[in-house]
Amino acid sequence: MCSSKDASFFWHLNIFETGVHVTTDEGNVYKNMQESQETHISNHLEEIVAAVSIAPRKKLQNQLLQRALFQPPREKLHLSEEKAKSYASSHEYKKALHELVHCMALTRICYGDSHWKLAEAHVNLAKGYLQLKGMSLQAKQHAEKAKEILTSSIAPPYKDNTDVFKCSVELFHTLGQALLSLQKFKEASKNLTKAEILSKEMLQCGKIIKEEWMEIQARIKLSFAQVYQGQKKSKEALPHYQEALEYTEISRGEKSLECVPILRELAAAEQALGFHDASINNLVQAHLIVLRGTPSREEAAASAHAVACAAVASGRPEHHDVAEQYFQDSMANLKDAEGMEKAKFLSIQDDYCHFLQVTGQDERATSILRESLEAKVAVFGDFSPEVAETYRLLGVADLAQGNQTGAHRKLKKRGKQAERMCLGLDCKAGSRQSGDLAPSSPYCDIYSTLHHSPLVGFQIRICLNRCLLCLEEVWKPMAEYRECQDQDK
């Protein structure tokens, strides 16, 4: 089967042999095109004529379909590889994974079952499952298959092949990441160590340049840091995060977007160790890098929100101004948003209200919560956890200010919503569809409700956590509650 270039070459060769004289004159070119169409010398010329004619379009489509069907496997493989990269870069992860599966099948056709290229295809598919879909078990299986192929296929022709060694480094690193996601930390560390040793040997032997080695080291060091952080060993993780950041800044640049996730994970480790100043500074640096690009409103808001939360977590008065600034920046990005972005805005606003309460600005927090209630009902629904939590906070605020009647009304409303969440009912007030589940108070008997709830275990745990929170923070002032109940009667 000839390629398109070969077909073009034979077409020109046929014209030369038949004595047709090709010139640059427009009339002669048109004449030659007519003669070629009449004698059907070349499929190439038929496609040109069909492209400007309405009638032969169907024929052209059939020809293109046939050409795609009979395209050489290696051409198809190259095309699938390019598609996979394109889909991954545009965050179309499902399509990217689909193309990676095609790549593996085509690689087997092109190279056989024991070629290192097939191992590379399995590694790429494993990375696709791990990074694009988060399916760690599938990633582990494909990485192990790649290891099996490499172990059995490395022979004298491949012994000095740099591509084989690069594939091996990617294999051990990917397998380490898969095991890390499965929380098999010891095995993950072993594979990451193999990747690190092999990459260092490649550098020493001159098989890779130092810049390429630094890029590999940045990824390996980051994975090592994640292994330690996954075991709550922030002290051991910290130097690995710092090395990963250093290698990335050298190889990619200090302002590159690749630095952002490393800075955020480094900040989390520093915060866990109580290094709040360093944590906030790293998150501010990450935020500035994000803003240098072209972030969406939600990305910019999330980045500013992370800085604000870190400032609040420090618990230090000197960080209150930082928290205020970045909360305002975050909410400003989503103020006029709709849909999912509106939900994100309301969530950030709740965190801001919590910050205001912590800093003694209760009246301001209560005012914002009260104003947000209508929007929350519209976005989340009247019987949503978000609305119920807002009623609870407003009730507690009223109780703290001595407004017992208002507190009772809001907390009673919250109690009914909590009851509906626990029971999963959609019925009118006063009616029951689950037997004699009469609550002993307006807030309901939480434990009894949970024991009789028809919901599955995971949902019960969610309800339990919410209702226990209600018990801890609402039922503490029992005397005030009893007095409010008497007033209601």
Image (spheres, rainbow, N blue to C red):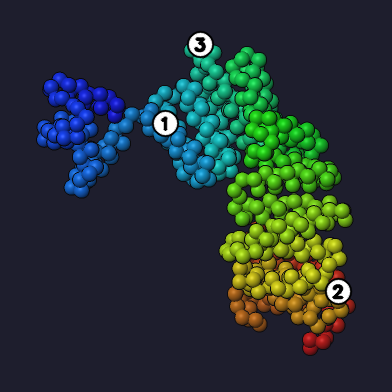
**Residue to which mark 2 is pinned:** 400
Tag 2, which secondary structure? Answer: helix
Q: Quadrant of the C terminus?
A: bottom right
* Residue 209 spot, x, y in % from top left: 61, 20
Residue lying at 48% horizontally and 42% vertically, measured from the top left: 87
Up-down: is 423 above or below 176? below
Q: What is the distance, in whole Å, between disc 3 and disc 1 at their CAs?
A: 27 Å
Answer whether residue 344 is visible to the viewer in this image.
no
390 vs 402, left or right, is: left
Q: Amino acid at mark 3?
A: Pro
Q: Which mark is residue 287?
A: none
Within-10-Å neighbours for mark 1: few <14, some 14–19, many 20+:
some
Tag 1, which secondary structure? Answer: helix
Judging depth in this view, the residue of 355 and 396 nearest the camera is 355
Q: Which of disc 1 and disc 3 is earlier in sequence?
A: 1
**Residue to which mark 1 is pinned:** 78
Answer whether residue 5 is visible to the viewer in this image.
yes
Q: Are marks 3 and 2 in contact (CB under 8 Å)?
A: no
Q: Amino acid at mark 1?
A: His
Considering every residue shown, the one lying at the far front of the view is 25
Q: Are marks 1 and 2 in contact (CB under 8 Å)?
A: no
Q: Which of disc 2 and disc 3 is earlier in sequence?
A: 3
Q: Nearer the viewer, mark 1 or mark 2?
A: 1
129 vs 414, left or right, is: left
Residue lying at 62% horizontally and 36% vertically, measured from the top left: 178
* Residue 16 spot, x, y in % from top left: 17, 21
362 vs 38, left or right, is: right
Res 275 → quadrant: top right
